[in-house]
Image (spheres, coloured by chain):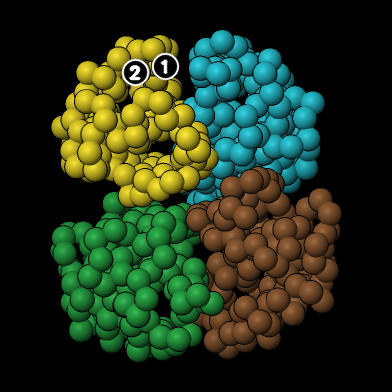
Chain colours: A yellow, B cyan, C brown, D green
Amino acid sequence: MELKMDIPALQAFLKTQFPQVAGELEVVALPDNGLTLKLSVHDHHLRPGGTVSGPSMFMLADVAVYLAILARLGPVALAVTTSCAMDFMRKPAAGADLVCEARLLKLGRVLAVGDAMIYSAGQVAPVARASMTYSIPPK
Amino acid sequence: MELKMDIPALQAFLKTQFPQVAGELEVVALPDNGLTLKLSVHDHHLRPGGTVSGPSMFMLADVAVYLAILARLGPVALAVTTSCAMDFMRKPAAGADLVCEARLLKLGRVLAVGDAMIYSAGQVAPVARASMTYSIPPK
Amino acid sequence: MELKMDIPALQAFLKTQFPQVAGELEVVALPDNGLTLKLSVHDHHLRPGGTVSGPSMFMLADVAVYLAILARLGPVALAVTTSCAMDFMRKPAAGADLVCEARLLKLGRVLAVGDAMIYSAGQVAPVARASMTYSIPPK
Amino acid sequence: MELKMDIPALQAFLKTQFPQVAGELEVVALPDNGLTLKLSVHDHHLRPGGTVSGPSMFMLADVAVYLAILARLGPVALAVTTSCAMDFMRKPAAGADLVCEARLLKLGRVLAVGDAMIYSAGQVAPVARASMTYSIPPK
């Protein structure tokens, strides 16, 4: 799919639309049909025991797939998350950032579907996986 | 199921274990097999357009089912969220708090399953629904 | 919601559209926003050990929510299943039929969301639960 | 992960344990951490309009991930499906078989997690995706 937004445009969009989280998120790659997003893990993402909280991982997967969609549709699109399914498989490595590899499986007229795999930076075994669906508003 | 923690005990547990969110969450009821949790919606839960963010709703559903489990198992249990499936169905009402009604469907030896329905306070149509599963550690 | 199809109309629709399964399915109730569907369990639904197979339970939940939608939209609608999330919680009782209680949570212009709880006939603890979403085609 | 069953052993296991579907399923590959399973599409898998039914695709994904687990644990294991999340994205191509590529994401002591992508044979765009979790019984 052709790109309508590159990495700097996506990063600028994040800053405007998601000011609360833009500072801790970095778009690191835009592979074919995908997008890679890094979360700088801070204390406020952690749960007792040092694990990254579920809501933080949900946010990471949701923003990654959302930006993967916008990169192909352009910033005018106002896609809305309609469902998610996540599996939490391993405790994230202590002190490591999280890297999320999102991939679009369908970018239809009214529905988009993507999945995401979350890793502790530098690790091979995934921490979590997510499937996300979005409703695309009519033009 | 017999209760091992009542509302004040659950609220105290929240304060110790989830200090970042305890101030905005209130356990309002402990019906049979369930638990009702209210989220006081603040600016930091909102997305552009005034809607409550997906991660905030995920947190609300996750904490509600988790506390519903602990109310029956007691505070020693260290259940871990293993999966969630959520549907986001309607935009929350502007300026309204969110109320989450959690219900346990299974509380097994190694796995617990619950679901949750999220409403804008005072509204009948649900905003979101969630299914959550937890792994129960061996004693 | 107003009903556009009653139980005999739904049963006749099943016979025409799902001839392979219509004989083993019976619409037993049409409560507010819901529908109750019974599966007569036969040998071909069973797995080794006498448990009802996952695909049979998926079929039961999918048809139940689908018919719950059609009862309100009428037979012209051609809703398509777009996603499902199921939890399998208990082994069904041996020799018992399965009863599925479906409930519509949203019946929007382009998306419908429902959930379903499956029980062994005469039992209180649910065997499985499902969330299903459907895409509603434009008129 | 080391293999405890090869393709002929898996195919023989299918024949014994899933006699109703073994004849239409073929294990075609055992890649690293994965398994590829082909469904020969027959009339009884079809819905009006010529599409493959949801339950048939659920069965394909479930058996594929299940065999991927058994290939690594051996035939004694009695894993039980505990949850699934599926997205149905495109209508399968008419007259084509379905190919399911399953991949294990976690093979823990008590829980296994896998995902699966389903394609119409010879097509690039996926028809459906699935996440499946299994409970592994204690030895």
Q: Which chain does the residue under circle 1 lie in?
A: A
In this rendering, the answer to whether A126 lies above or below C104 is above
Q: Mark 2 and mark 1 in contact (Cβ < 8 Å)?
A: yes
Viewer-proximal residue, D134 or B1? Answer: D134
Residue type at mark 2: give it: Phe
Identity of the residue drawn at 74% across and 37% down: B125
Q: Quadrant of the C terminus of chain C?
A: bottom right
Question: Whole-percent x and y of residue C104?
Answer: 71, 52
Q: Is residue D36 above or below residue D17?
A: above
Task: Check if mark 1 and mark 2 are on a common chain.
Answer: yes
Q: Nearest the camera: D116 or A33?
A: A33
| Residue type beneath disc 1 | Gln
**Residue at the spot of label 1:** A17
Front-most of residues D139 and B123:
B123
Chain containing the residue with disc 2: A
Badge 1, how many Cα within 10 Å: few under 14, some, many 20+?
few
Q: Position of residue A59 (x, y in %)?
A: 41, 28
Residue at numbered disc 2: A13
Q: Quadrant of residue C81?
A: bottom right
Residue D62 visible in the snapshot: no
Query: Which element type, helix, strand or loop, lies under badge 2?
Result: helix
Q: Can residue D6 be seen by looking at this rendering?
A: yes
Residue D100 point in image, percent of width and height: 30, 67
Residue A6's image quarter? top left
